[in-house]
Image (cartoon, rainbow, N blue to C red):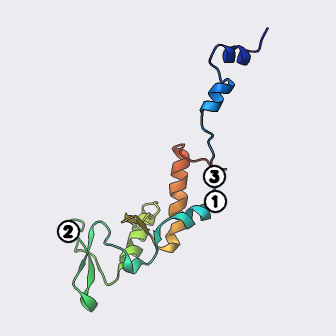
Amino acid sequence: KRAGGEAAAEAGGGGGLEEWASVPPRVEVLMTAQAVRNALPLSLDAESFHAPPGWRLQGEGAAARWVEVDPLPGMAPREYATRSEVEERLEEAAAAEGRVWLGQLVGGAWELRSRCVAAALEQLLSGLVVLGLAKAV
């Protein structure tokens, strides 16, 4: 009696040498979180970040202010002198809701302050693992 694999291979199915040879090899590269971070197109200077959703830059020069576009009903729009202050408040709001601030993608660059990159990257990678798109080893 022949083994099932040999019989299946001779019958034209079940993973014979020809079938194995027709499938290109699959190579997966192991990467550390730091290697992933180094490969990302990060923009870390908050003062050069674009306006986040719900905010706009009003005025010019020393009089310029970052102003909230749609404040909560009955609330005055929040205003900050620098883009860094806006980023700080967005980070704080995300933390208060138990979330990680992920910044924003603009023109192929990930705008996120350096102190938030590790937590954001961990959340993104964990999400990929949960979805089965990456594997933790």
Residue 74 numbered mark, or none: 2
> Could you tell me which residue is drawn at 63 percent across and 59 percent down?
32
Q: Which one is earlier in the sequence, the residue at label 2 or at label 3?
A: 3
Residue at position x 51%, y 44% in the image: 131
Residue extending furthest top? 1
The crowd level at tag 1 (other Cα within 10 Å; few <14, some 14-19, many 20+) is few
Within 10 Å of the Cα at label 2, are there few (<14), some (14-19), or many (20+) other Cα atoms?
A: few
**Residue 31 visible to an observer of this rendering:** yes
Amino acid type at circle 1 is Thr
Give the spatial CA distance, label 2 vs label 1. 47 Å
On the image, the x and y values in percent for residue 65 come to 27, 82
Where residue 137 appears, as percent x and y from the top left, is 67, 50
Residue 32 bears which disc, if any? 1
Give the residue pinned by disc 3.
Answer: 29
Above or below 132: residue 64:
below
Residue at 36% over, 66% down: 106
Mark number for residue 15?
Answer: none
Helix, strand or loop at mark 3:
loop
Up/down of 17 relative to 110, above or below: above
Type of amino acid at the residue the image marks with label 3: Val
Q: Secondary structure at mark 2?
A: loop
User: In the shown orientation, is residue 63 left or right of residue 27?
Assistant: left
* Labels 2 and 3 touching (C-beta < 8 A): no
Specify the quadrant of the image occupied by residue 79.
bottom left
